[in-house]
Image (cartoon, grey):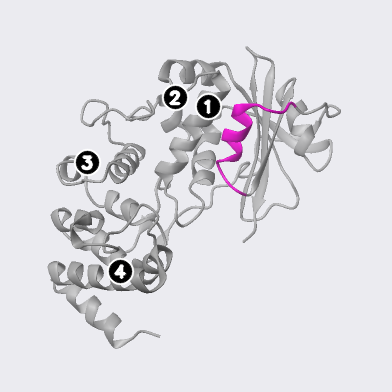
Amino acid sequence: MITYEDRRLRTLAEDGRWPELLGAYRQARAAAAARGGERSAAAETAPLGHLIAYGAPPELAVRLFDPDGGPGAAAGVADHDTGPLWEVLATRHSWLRLAPLLGPPLVRRLVAHTRVLMGEDLAYGAEPDPEGVPLLLEPWESAGWGDGPRVREYLPGGGSRSALLGLPASREGLGPVLLPEPVARLTGQRATRALAALAGWVEVACVRGPAPQAAARLAPDLRVTGGYLPLAAAYPALVQAGAGDRAHGSALGRLALWRALAAMSGADRPDRAEVNALVARMRCFTWCDPADELRHLHLALEDPATGLSWAISGSEEA
C-alpha cells in the first residue's frame, strides 16, 4: 500500500526538492538506527535513498554517504533497495562528476569499479586500486559482454532490470561428453576459497588434472552436454554470480573474480600481468545440469602451467 508519506516524498522528488528529501532521509535513517540498528535502518530507508541516488544532482546525491548528518544518518555500502545505493549513484554520473565529491574510501572504490564496468577507463583518472585491480577493463573482460547491461539498469521510482546470466546460457556449441572418472580433491588451496566466495550457492572443487576431470567431481553424471569456451565468454556470468545478491553490485563481483584469478596464478594480490598470463593459457570447460534454476553456473578452469583445475558449480533457486 502506498502511504501518504510515500506520495509526499515522490512529489518532492518530482519537484526537485532534493535538500528536503535528503533531510527526510537522514532523519528517518537515524531514528530507525536508534530503534532497531543499522540493518533495520538500511531496509526502512532504502526506497527513499534510491530516489535520491537516482535523481538528485551528484553534489547532493553523494551526501547520502556523508557522515556529517550524525549517528546512523549516513548510508553504508550495504544499504540497498533492488541494488546497492552506491551502484544506483554510479550508473547516473560519470567518474569525472563524482570523483571530487565522494568521500568514504570504500564507496569511492566501488563507484570507480562500477564506472570501469560501464566502459570508463580510469587508469589515469583515479587513485590506484588498493588491491591492484586494474581501473580499466582488460580486453578479455570486455569481449564476452553482448548488448545487455553490465550493471543493473535502475528505474527512477525504484526497482531495476538485470539479465539473469547463466553458464552455459544454452546448449548451442555444446555436445555429448563422457567425463573421466573423478579423482581425489585437493584441499587447502587459497584459490578454492576465493572461487567459493563468488556466490553462496556454488560448490568448488580442485583436482590435479584437466578441466573435465574437475567437472567430474561436481557434475550429476559422467555423461554430460558440454564443451570448451574462452574465459571471456564465461566472464559476465562469473561477475554476475558475485553480484547476485541485492546487497551486492557488479563491482563487488569483478573484485571477487580478480582475487580468485590472482590466487589461481599464485600471486598474493591481483597482479595485472600475472592474471593476463593466466587467462591467456587457461582452458575452460562448461556443462549443463538438468536441474538448473534461473541462475546457474557450471564451469571448470584449467591452468596447464600447474596441472591444476577448479570446478565451480551451482544453481540459485528462483
Q: Tell me, yes or no, if residue 147 can be seen here.
A: no
Q: Which mark is residue 93?
A: none
Residue interval drawn in magenta: 186-200
Q: Is residue 118 left or right of residue 244?
A: left
Q: Earlier in the sequence, mark 2 or mark 4?
A: 4
Task: Say which amino acid is labelled 3.
Answer: Trp
Q: Few, some or many C-alpha atoms within 10 Å of disc 3 (few <14, some 14-19, many ≥20)?
A: many
The residues tagged by marks 2 and 1 sit, at their Cα atoms, a distance apart of 8 Å
220 displayed left or right of 283: right
**Which residue is under mark 1?**
261
Instruction: Find residue 60 and report its horizontal and vertical position in percent.
Output: 15, 58
Point 47% across, 16% down: residue: 274
Front disc: 4 or 3: 4
Q: Compute the Cα span from label 2 to label 4.
A: 37 Å
**Residue assigned mark 3:** 95
Disc 2 to disc 1: CB gap under 8 Å: yes
Which of the pair 61/316 is nearer the observer?
A: 61
> Element under label 1?
helix
Q: Which residue is mark 2?
A: 270
Q: Position of residue 29 (x, y in %)?
A: 30, 69
